[in-house]
Image (cartoon, grey):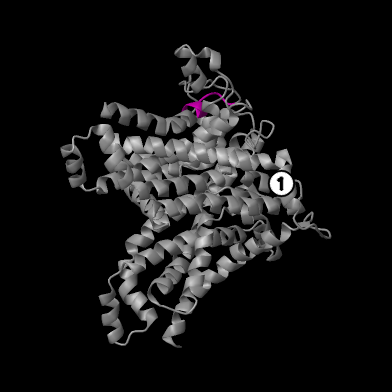
Amino acid sequence: MKALVRAGLAVVTVLPLAELLVTALHPPGTYPPGLTWPQDPHWSNFALAFRSARVDRALASGAVVVLAVVPAVLVLAGLAGYGLARLPFPGRRVVSGLFLVGLVLPREAVVLPLYQQVRDLGLLDTTAGLALALIATHLPFAIVWMRAHFASAPAELADCARVDGAGPWAVLRRVHLPLAGDALRSLGLLLCVWTWNHLLFALVLVDDPLRRTAAGALDAFQGRWGTDVPLLCAGALLITAPVVAVLALAHHRFADALVRGVAVR
Amino acid sequence: MTPRLAGWLFVLPALAVYGVFVLRPLALVAQYSLYRWDGVGPSTWVGWDNYAAVLTDPDLRRPLVNALLLVVAFAGGPVVLGLALAVVVRPGPVLVLPQAVPPVAAGLAWSVLLSSTGAVNRALDAVGLGGVTRAWLGDSATALAAVGVIGAWALVGLCALLLSAGVRRLDPALYEAARLDGAGRWREFRAVTLPGVRREIGVCVVVTSLAALSSFDVVYVTTRGGPGGATAVPALEVFHLAFTQREVGLASALAVLLVVLVLGVVAPVLRWSR
């Protein structure tokens, strides 16, 4: 019975991915019936999607955005989380409150003035503009996460260092940072996945679909091959593959990070 | 440099980026919502008119109603199912896969699965339910429910994992005591498990509600809010009003109401589960 429930669950979980795969193998331009293995699988569809829709460029662009966003968020959130957790300063409560607002704020609510802000800075259609928007909206979660980590670190270590005359910066670098590796890696993993999958800001801030996040490029395929379902599915699968690969390598870390991330809130 | 102010230096870089790209836009949205403006020309002060329009015009009000219905689907399904799974089986980490798949790809896959000739309808045919088959996302009677199903698929695994972590933390002595009192499986669940994982249930409801209220990607890819506004949701409507219809005031009023809705749903749940 339990095994049956587990198996059913696993089937439903991977069903959409299986559908993408078998649909992508049908002849281009057809409208295949669902979940049927084609007579002669067109593995060439993946190459076609790669070349004709320049999925290769979309993937490269998605990777560039991830590289621009994630390290920056880790640095900013690491510093701010440490400041909030370990260095009592006047106004700390207010600052924490401001970041908490961002934790539940839907991005769509601020997307229009944010677009104007990026436009006024002359950063529309640039990786920098898209990255700044994503960095800012990822910060609340990342800061709450890092603050929780630094708050749970043993106080004795820092006290010893401080007796030795180390300032807050030295304490962070020599005492806390070596212990924060795990928290930073898990947070980084979540941020990579979320950035890769992000659509809204990519749609609004960058016109050229090949210079967006990976998910933002898929929207362009819909415009291009609106009715060519097999090619659409091939493109979608190519965009999903890196995330699934990362998950295969680190799915325990990802699951733990998700659960911890939710609990942190 | 006094130690009292050192903390500020650490927080300042993050606060600056966040202030420019989130806090200031939030303040501007509140301001725009009181004007009629096309985003470029002169603007006119209209006070609360935009809010009145959003709340009285059926086309503008519909996204807010749909959002609440989606909260029921996104939260109800995954929490109930997740709880059942957490108690019956120990859910494996493969369940977080839907949380990693890009929502745009998941949306595309589900629109193929739910299409008129798709796998879901063929399965219904096979078990003799051919009468109910339809294009689930293209029929205004079922489109919103279909979006709810996609959302539930994305969230059920996460909830099952969270709840199962909560169930495993419960003290076995409590179950011993319940059994000595002669409680059956169901009484045990109601008297021990349910109150024990109250916090986790609250967290699940908050996370799923947030996902429902800010659902954009899946709706954008599968239905664009159609057919005939059946799946219009605030996030998508704000996007349309702001960027295609150039109704900045209306878009902003809807955005403010969306924030109010989020706080209105999340705050009571957090209070209940603490």
Could you say whether the residue bearing mark 1 is in a helix, strand or loop? helix
Q: Residues within 10 Å of mark 1 (few under 14, many from 20)?
A: many
Question: Where is residue A187, by image quadrant?
Answer: bottom left
Q: Is residue B124 above or below residue B261?
A: above
- Quarter of the picture containing the N terminus of chain A is top left
Chain under numbered label 1: B
Furthest residue toward front: B181
**Total labels drawn:** 1
Q: Is residue A23 magenta?
A: yes
Amino acid type of the residue tagged 1 in the rendering:
Val
Task: Please give the name of the residue rendered at 58% of the width and 59% of the height, measured from the top-left corner.
Answer: A133
Residue A233 visible to an observer of this rendering:
no
In-image side of A73 versus B49 (left or right): left
Q: Position of residue B148 (x, y in %)?
A: 52, 35
Which residue is found at the position 32% from the left and 66% from the top?
Answer: A152
**Placement of the C terminus of chain A among the 4 image quadrants:** bottom left
Residue B37 shown left or right of residue B24 in the figure: right
- The residue that mark 1 highlights is B54
* Camera-nearest residue between B224 and B185: B185
- Tell whether B158 sits left or right of A211: left
From the viewer's side, name the closer residue of A255 and A216.
Answer: A255
What is the quadrant of residue B18 in the picture? bottom right
**Magenta residues, start to end:** A22-28
User: From where the camera sits, is residue A208 visible?
Assistant: yes
Q: Residue furthest top?
A: B128
- Can you give x and y, in whole percent of width and height, for residue A18 in the image? 44, 30
* Residue B104 spot, x, y in % from top left: 54, 40
The residue at the point 56 percent across, 24 percent down is B115
